[in-house]
Amino acid sequence: MHIAVIGSGYVGLVAAACFAELGHTVVCVDNDEQKLEALQRGETPIHEVYLPELLQRHRGLRLSYSGSVAEAVRASSVIFIAVGTPPLESGDADLSYVEAVAREIAFSLNGYKVIVEKSTVPVYTSEWLKRVIRLTCPENEEFDVVSNPEFLREGTAVTDFLYPDRIVIGADSERSREVLEQVYLPLLSGSYYEQAHRIPEPGELADRVKVIYTSAKSAELIKHASNAFLAMKISFINAVANVCEAVEADVEEVRRGMGSDARIGSAFLRAGIGYGGSCFPKDVAAFRSVAEQARCSFRLLDEVIAINEEQRSRFIAKVREALWTLKGKRVGVLGLAFKGGTDDVRESPAIAIVKSLLAQQCAIQAYDPAAMKGARNILGDSIAYAGDAYEAAQGADALLILTDWEEFAALDLERLKQVLRYPIIIDGRNLYSLETMQSSGLMYVSMGRPVIQHPSSATRKLKSGELAK
Ligand code: UDX
């Protein structure tokens, strides 16, 4: 099939590469010329496992890049809209890019096309798209609008795409539903999984990819409701973590107990400094707004957002409690990305915490395996950038873990103790077991678990008056 993907951000680029991997001829459109040139040169603009391989494998063969929506539309029978839907001040999604693309598509229709919403959009967007395209396109042109939301996590987006736990097809006509089935046929029939050069499966291969057929409106709601529900799980466990702290229980034990109930499940029950990224904060706010506009009170979402924001202040309070005063303290920071496995710093709780510490006159030295460039764009020279975790810890009054990178869960604790000015770790992601930290000789503060006080070393420094610098 000939497919156009409009917008080559995280979602669009991954989708385009994966459609090419499934055997389709794909043109990926963007209006950012520099980005197009970089893609044409074979560069991968984002940190995403397997994406460089796929872009390399299909570039110039089944995958091309273009700045022209019109040309791409004329050459394709299915057009995926994957442009940004950033939040407006009100929390509503800004749909102006989607609308502008819809008009461009409408001008270029030449025969029946299926126009697919891939970006996360509020319910009713499909109706608006139909209306705008109908009013703009030449008379009698045939088209359908389908909602086919993505559930891709950054860092594992390629395998999430090729090994999905479900594909939601929100189509209001039989004809468009069949077109979407053709698009995903190699996954639905399983033929992709028999290919020798397939991207390797991330875990056990399910018998069959589940397809869920719905109306376009229901599909739009599935996306918003899913993300809001996951965000709610995170805020729920964070609120439980706060209770755990108050009564000296251990949230990791509570999580294990709760999560083993199949009705609850343990995923997305990791306590920490709160969720971030380009999706959850935006989608929860947009869904709240959708509910409000539909005159449905959904105050639960207000609380989800409030708990998430409070987690950051609670973390800062922990830092203050461990260090007494903040002004003039040197703080090592591990992690700037909004989660491990990505270079994305959008809505990163780590960045928010760093900004807050800077405002309280701490000196920050930070390290992230992939997000240094993104962080520098936001923080500039206000912090020092370290070459690795130990350099970030060097001479610091405390070391903060703010992102759940795997390598931060396997640090040489003895070495850290040597390089830190004071042996204090404040872990916003609960990467270490209390048993490990108990024997490490470090003070260890985490989320929803008892504090492990450091034994002799800090006391010694305290006695010598060093801590009161
Ligand atoms: C999310 C959805 O998972 C995906 O389906 C959707 O399409 C896009 O949004 P992503 O933003 O890549 O994906 O990140 P995700 O892995 O879901 O994590 C979101 C945030 O929640 C991160 O900041 C992460 O650190 C945090 N999180 C996640 C927790 O704090 N605790 C958890 O248990 C899980």
Image (cartoon, rainbow, N blue to C red):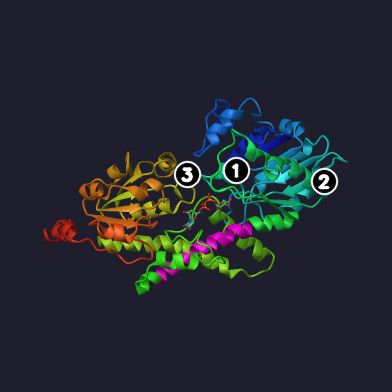
Mark 3 touching mark 2, by CB under 8 A?
no
- SS under mark 2: helix
Q: Which residues are magenta?
A: 224-243
- SS under mark 1: helix
Q: Which mark is residue 175?
A: 2
Q: Earlier in the sequence, mark 3 or mark 2?
A: 2
Above or below for 278 versus 308: above
Majority secondary structure of the magenta segment?
Answer: helix
What residue is pinned by disc 3? 342
Q: How many marks?
A: 3
Q: Residue shown at 60%/43% (left/top)?
A: 11
Q: Quadrant of the C terminus?
A: bottom left
Location of residue 1 in the rendering, given as x and y in whole percent from the top left corner:
74, 34
What residue is pinned by disc 1? 11
Location of residue 75 in the rendering, given as x and y in whole percent from the top left corner:
75, 31
Of the pair 441 and 103, the residue shown nearer to us:
441
- SS under mark 3: loop
Location of residue 26 in the rendering, given as x and y in whole percent from the top left corner:
68, 33
Residue 155 relative to residue 1: left or right: left
**To which quarter of the image does residue 220 belong?**
bottom right
Q: Which mark is residue 77?
A: none
Crowd around label 2: few <14 · some 14–19 · many ≥20 (10 Å): few
Q: Residue shown at 33%/62% (left/top)?
A: 318
Q: Amino acid at mark 3?
A: Thr
